[in-house]
Image (cartoon, rainbow, N blue to C red):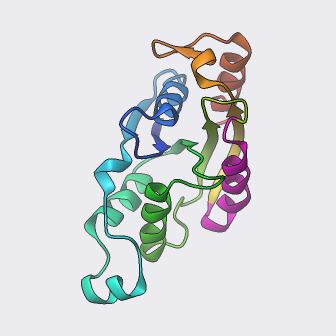
């Protein structure tokens, strides 16, 4: 199984990228491709820029990465209760190429934060919108207090580890 994983954040130390990578790698025998949103920097989406410059190659690369995979594991960072600007911009450009951005792929949708909220507001938004863009969400989890749950690249909370393992079993 080919799994595409990414944290919907541009932070070089993204805890969401770490969670998505860890979770995707729970699927034994899978081939995991880990995306870094910083590799998809583009002008802020606007119809004016699209008319003037066309759709950036990075947007096509994002759509192509989804097309070449069997399943997706994404973990959303929460910025002021919503998506990060980096993710939203990539998504907006990608949707100009393919309205069905997630191309009917099975998805595990996650979120995490250092605090007790676990970025649950953005997770709810993501879950509620994925079907409009052909994301087949098979499971989701908000992971609060990230630094109490993951140490040195490993989930140390057994309950969270079991929940993540159960989620990826649905892919």
Residue 120 forms part of the magenta stretch? yes
Q: Position of residue 21 (x, y in %)?
A: 47, 30
Answer with left or right where residue 74 lies relative to residue 9.
Answer: right
Q: Identify the residue at image location x=36%, y=43%.
A: 36
Answer with left or right where residue 57 lies relative to residue 59.
Answer: left
Main SS class of the magenta portion in the image: helix
Task: Count the marks.
Answer: 0
Q: Identify the residue at image location x=35%, y=65%.
A: 59
Q: Position of residue 66 (x, y in %)?
A: 44, 53
Residue 16 forms part of the magenta stretch? no
Q: Identify the residue at image location x=33%, y=83%.
A: 49
| Vertical comparison of 164 with 63: above or below | above
Q: Nearer the viewer, residue 161 or 157?
A: 157
Picture quarter with the C terminus: top right
| Vertical comparison of 119 with 21: above or below | below
| Vertical comparison of 108 with 152: above or below | below
What segment carries the magenta color? 118-134
Q: Position of residue 122 (x, y in %)?
A: 66, 50
Residue 60 is drawn in which quadrant? bottom left
Q: Nearer the viewer, residue 80 or 160?
A: 80
| Vertical comparison of 3 with 152: above or below | below
Residue 73 is drawn in which quadrant? top right
Q: Identify the residue at image location x=70%, y=56%.
A: 125
Q: Position of residue 19 (x, y in %)?
A: 53, 29
């Amino acid at each position: 199984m080919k799994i595409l994983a990414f944290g919907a954040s541009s932070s070089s130390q993204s805890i969401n990228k770490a969670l998505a990578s860890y979770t995707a790698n729970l699927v034994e025998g899978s081939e995991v491709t880990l995306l870094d949103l910083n590799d998809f920097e583009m002008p802020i989406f606007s119809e004016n820029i699209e008319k003037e410059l066309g759709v950036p190659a990075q947007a096509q690369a994002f759509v192509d990465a989804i097309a070449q995979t069997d399943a997706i594991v994404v973990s959303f960072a929460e910025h002021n209760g919503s998506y990060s600007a980096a993710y939203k911009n990539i998504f907006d450009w990608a949707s100009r190429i393919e309205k069905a951005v997630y191309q009917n792929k099975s998805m595990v949708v996650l979120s995490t934060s250092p605090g007790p909220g676990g970025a649950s507001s953005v997770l709810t938004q993501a879950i509620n919108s994925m079907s409009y863009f052909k994301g087949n969400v098979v499971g989701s989890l908000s992971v609060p207090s990230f630094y109490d749950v993951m140490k040195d690249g490993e989930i140390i909370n057994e309950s969270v580890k079991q929940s993540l393992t159960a989620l990826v079993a649905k892919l």
